[in-house]
Amino acid sequence: MPTFAVGVDIGASTTKIGLVAGDAPARIAMAHTIPTQLQGIDPDLFVTYISETVRQMAHGARITRLGVSLCSLINADHTGAMLSVNAPALNRFNIKEAFEARFGCSVRVMNDVNAYALAEKYY
């Protein structure tokens, strides 16, 4: 059974999701964009929407790890947004825990600019 790592970039208007194949070198196997709908809604509903989209994209493959980037100030524990101007519903929401509960894998949360810099360094 194939395995995938998942990258989720939550932006102000769109959220980009990428499945990264587990083979070396890493490659994006599939990408999808969905609307970011976080103006005043329950953030758990949005995480559910992302999770369902990931499961459809993965076609039953196992998700081994998941990274989330946010256009936000990230809290010290790296569990979510301390301050998100573009997605205020995510403020103080533990997005790390929400995804870990859904996928049972390691989840990393970071600021989107830091994520871009790491991607640039390694890929």
Image (cartoon, rainbow, N blue to C red):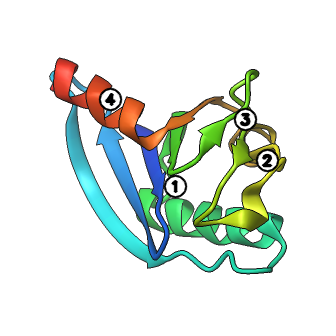
Closer mark to the observer between disc 4 and disc 1: 4
- The amino acid pointed to by label 2 is Ala
Say which label, 1 or 3, has the lower sequence index: 1
Measure the alpha-carbon separation of dots 2 and 4. 23 Å
Identify residue for label 2. 98
The disc placed on residue 22 is 4
Measure the alpha-carbon separation of dots 3 and 4. 17 Å
Image coordinates for residue 106, horizontal then vertical, percent? 63, 26
Q: Check the image and report above or below for 123 versus 62.
A: above
Q: Secondary structure at mark 4?
A: loop
Q: Quadrant of the N terminus?
A: top left
Q: Are marks 1 and 2 in contact (CB under 8 Å)?
A: no
- The amino acid pointed to by label 1 is Gly
Measure the alpha-carbon separation of dots 1 and 3. 14 Å
**In this view of the protein, which residue sits in the foreground, 9 or 40?**
40
Q: Secondary structure at mark 1?
A: loop
Q: Dot 1, how many residues are within 10 Å of its Cα: few (below 14), some (14-19), or many (20+)?
A: few
Q: Check the image and report above or below for 86 versus 104.
A: below
Measure the alpha-carbon separation of dots 1 and 2. 20 Å
